[in-house]
Image (cartoon, coloured by chain):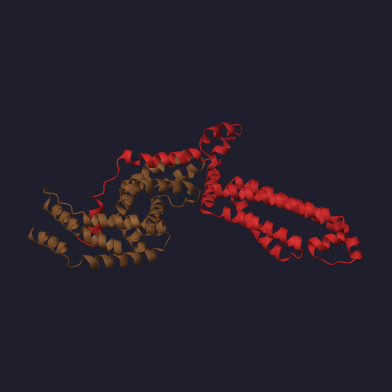
Amino acid sequence: MNDMELLRELAQETPLPAPAELDPARARLAAAIAADPAAGRFTAVPEVTMHQPYPSGGQPVESLRPPAPAPVLSAVKLMYGGVVGTVMQLIIALAFIGDIKAYHLAVLGHHLTTAQLSHLRPLIITLVIVVGLVVIALWLSMARAVGQGRNWARILSTVLFGLATLELIGNHGVAQVLWAMLTWLTGLAAVWQLWRPASSAFFRRCRQAALTRRP
Amino acid sequence: MRRRRAAAADDAAVIESSWREPERFAVLFDRHAPHIYRYLARRAGRQVADDLVAETFLAAFAKRDRYDLRHADARPWLYGIATNLVGQHRRDEARQYRISQAAVAEPEAAGHAERVAADVTARAMRPLLDAALAALPAGDRDVLLLIAWEQLTYQEVSRALAIPVGTVRSRLHRARTKTRQVLAGTDAAATYEEITTNE
C-alpha cells in the first residue's frame, strides 16, 4: 500500500453528508440568490421579446441570444460614460470657440497668430463639431452593438481604443490632455471588460446563435 | 466518480444560464455541495465544514460572471475556492489533524482478509499520516489532497489553485517524498507487510 492508497483509504472514513446537513448552506445560498437583482426577472423576458418574432423560424429573436453577462453590461455602461465625457468635451470646446485664440491656447495648447486664426476659424469650428459628433456616434454604436453580442464591435472597439491611445500622444493643452486621459481610461476599462472570459464566452455563444438562425 | 464527471460536463451551461436566472445556480449546489462538504470536513472538521461549504458557494455565486465557460466542469473552480477558504482556517485544519492523531479507532472484526489488512494498516498509520500532512507546506498539502482525496487530474488542480501544471507536479512529488519518509520503516507498515505475506 503506497502513500496515495493510504490517503484514499483514510478518506473513505468520511461519508458524504446527509441532505439535511446541507440545509443551512442551501438556505444561505437561496437567500443570496433571492437578493440578486436578476432573480425572478427571467419569467418576464419572453413577454418582452415576443413582439419581435424571427421571420422564418417563428422563435423570438431575443430568446435565441444568450443574456449579456455582467462584464459586457459594465462595458456598455462605460461606453455610455464615454458618450457623456465626449459631450462635455464638445461643450467646453464650443464655449471656448467664441474666443478662438483663447480656445487654441487653453484647449489645444497651440500658439497661432490672429491672422492665421481668423483664416482658419470656420474650418476649426466645423472640425470640432464634426469630430465630436462622430466620436459620440462611435461610442453609441459600439455600446449598442457590443450589448447585442456583435463580435466585430468588440474588435472594432479595441482598434478604436488603440487609435485613441495614439491620439493621446498628440495632445498638448492641459484641458485637452485631462479630458483625453479621462476618455482613454474609460475606453481602457470598457475594452478590459470586453475581453474578460465571461464576455468572450458571451460573444462566442452569440456567434453560434447567429449561425443556427441562418436558414 | 465517472458519473460525477459526466454530470459536471454541463456546469458551464448552468453557470451561464445563472447570469440571467440566478436561481439556476442552485443546480450547481445540488450537484457538487456534498463532495465539497466532504472535502472540507476532511480538512477542517465537520463543524467548520458546515460554514465553509456555504461560504464556498456564496463566493462562487458572487463571482459566477467571471467563470471561464471554456471549462465545462466547474469542480476545479469550486475546489479552488474551497481550498482558499481552508487556507483562511489553517488553525482549524491543524486542530483537525491533531484530533485525528489522537483518535485510535478499532479495526473491523469481520470482512475480507485483504480489506481488513488494508484497514489495519490505514488506521495504524493514521496518526503518522496526519502528522506528515500537518508538517507539509500548505501549497504542497493542497495539491496532494486534491489529487489523493478528490481525484482531480494535474490539469484540474492547476486550474483550481491557479498554478502551472509543472508546479502541481513538483509540489506533488515533494509532498509524496516527505510523506513516504515519515511512513517508511514504521511498525504499521511492517504489520501490513506481515499480514499480506502470511496470506
The one of A95 and B17 positioned closer to us in this rendering: A95
Report the label total: 0
Image point (20%, 67%), residue name: B184
Could one spot residue A195 in this view of the protein? yes
| Left or right: A215 in relation to B13 | right
| Left or right: A151 in relation to B166 | right
Could one spot residue A58 in this view of the protein? no
The one of A142 and B30 positioned closer to us in this rendering: B30
The one of B36 and A212 positioned closer to us in this rendering: B36
Q: Colour of chain B?
A: brown
Position of residue A146 relative to residue A118, above or below, is above
Position of residue B48 relative to residue B20, above or below, is below
Q: Position of residue B116 (x, y in %)?
A: 14, 53
Q: Where is residue A172 in the image (x, y as percent from the top left)?
A: 76, 65
Q: Where is residue B42 in the image (x, y as percent from the top left)?
A: 30, 52
Position of residue B94 relative to residue A67, above or below, is below
Q: Residue furthest right?
A: A115
The one of A59 and B51 positioned closer to us in this rendering: B51
Image point (32%, 53%), residue name: B44
Image point (26%, 53%), residue name: A11
Q: Which residue lies furthest to the left in this view?
A: B198
Q: Quadrant of residue B50?
A: top left
Q: Quadrant of residue A62?
A: top right
Q: Chain A is drawn in which colour?
A: red
| Left or right: B186 in relation to A209 | left
Q: Position of residue B147 (x, y in %)?
A: 32, 57
- Which quadrant is home to the C terminus of chain B? bottom left
Q: In which quarter of the image is residue B125?
A: bottom left
